[in-house]
Image (cartoon, grey):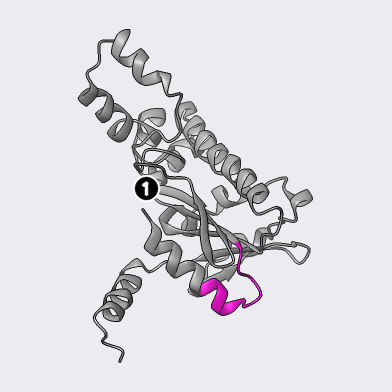
Amino acid sequence: FHGTSYAYVSQQVIKSYPNIRSMIICHLGNGASMCCIKDGKCLDTTMGLTPLDGLMMGTRSGDIDAGLHIFLHRELGKSPAEIDTILNKQSGLIGLSGISSDMREVLAAAESGNARAILARKVYIERIRKYLGAYLIKLRGKCGAIVFTAGVGENDSDLRAQVCSGLETFGISLDSSRNYAKSDSILHDIGSATSVLKILVAATNEEQAIALHSASLANLFL
C-alpha cells in the first residue's frame, strides 16, 4: 500500500541526487506509512498484512497490543466485525481527538488548546519518530535522506519540525525558514547547512506513476 507513491518519490530523489540511493520516506496523509529504502529498493515498510499495522492514521489505530482484540471481545463483548470497525474506522486521529480524521481540523483544534487534539498530534508524531529511529538502525546509519510526502507530509510544517526536533546527533537538522517556506517544486530541501542527511519535501504523483507503469506494461514506449 502506498507502493506507487514510494516508487515515484524515490525515483525523483535519485534523479535529483544520484548519490542518494538509501532513504526513509514518510507518506503521511489520511492513510499513513513509512518505507525504508536501501540501494533503490524497499527494505521494509510500516504496513503489514493489512494497512492497520504501523503508523497511526486518520481513522486507523496503527500499532496496538495484540491482546486488545481479546480484551474487546472478552471484557466488552465486541464481535469481530465491531472490533474491525473500531480499529479501522473509529480510531487514529478521529478516535483520539474526538474531532476529525482530517489533520488540518485536528491541528486547528490543537492550536486553540484542545487537549485531545494536542494528544492526537503527539501520538501521531511519536509513532513516526519511533519508526524513523528503527529505520535508521536498519540502514546501519547509511541513510541519505528523510523524505516527507502526501497531504500531511507536504503541508504540515509544524509536524515536520517536531518529527525532526532534537535529532542533530543523527545528522538530521532542519532549517526553520526553509521548512515554513512554500515551494512549487517536486522536491524541496528543508535541511540546514549542517544537516548530514538531506531532509526533503516531495510532491508525490501516484496517478502519473500508475499511468507510466501501465504504459510500460502495454509496451507503449516501444
- Say if residue 2 shows up in the picture: yes
Residue sitting at 39 percent across and 33 percent down?
A: 61
Residue highlighted by disc 1: 31
Q: Nearer the viewer, residue 97 or 27?
A: 27
**Residue 82 drawn above or below residue 122:** above
Residue kind at label 1, given as amino acid type = Gly
- Percent position (x, y) of residue 17? 62, 76
Residue sitting at 55 percent across and 79 percent down?
A: 15
**Residue 15 drawn above or below residue 43:** below
Crowd rating for badge 1 (residues with CA inside 10 Å; few <14, some 14–19, many 20+): many
Query: Relative to residue 53, is residue 167 drawn left or right?
Result: right
- Percent position (x, y) of residue 153? 48, 55
**Residue 44 drawn above or below residue 124:** below
Tell me, yes or no, whether the highlighted magenta stretch contains residue 21.
yes
Q: Which residues are magenta?
A: 12-22
Tell me, yes or no, whether the highlighted magenta stretch contains residue 47.
no
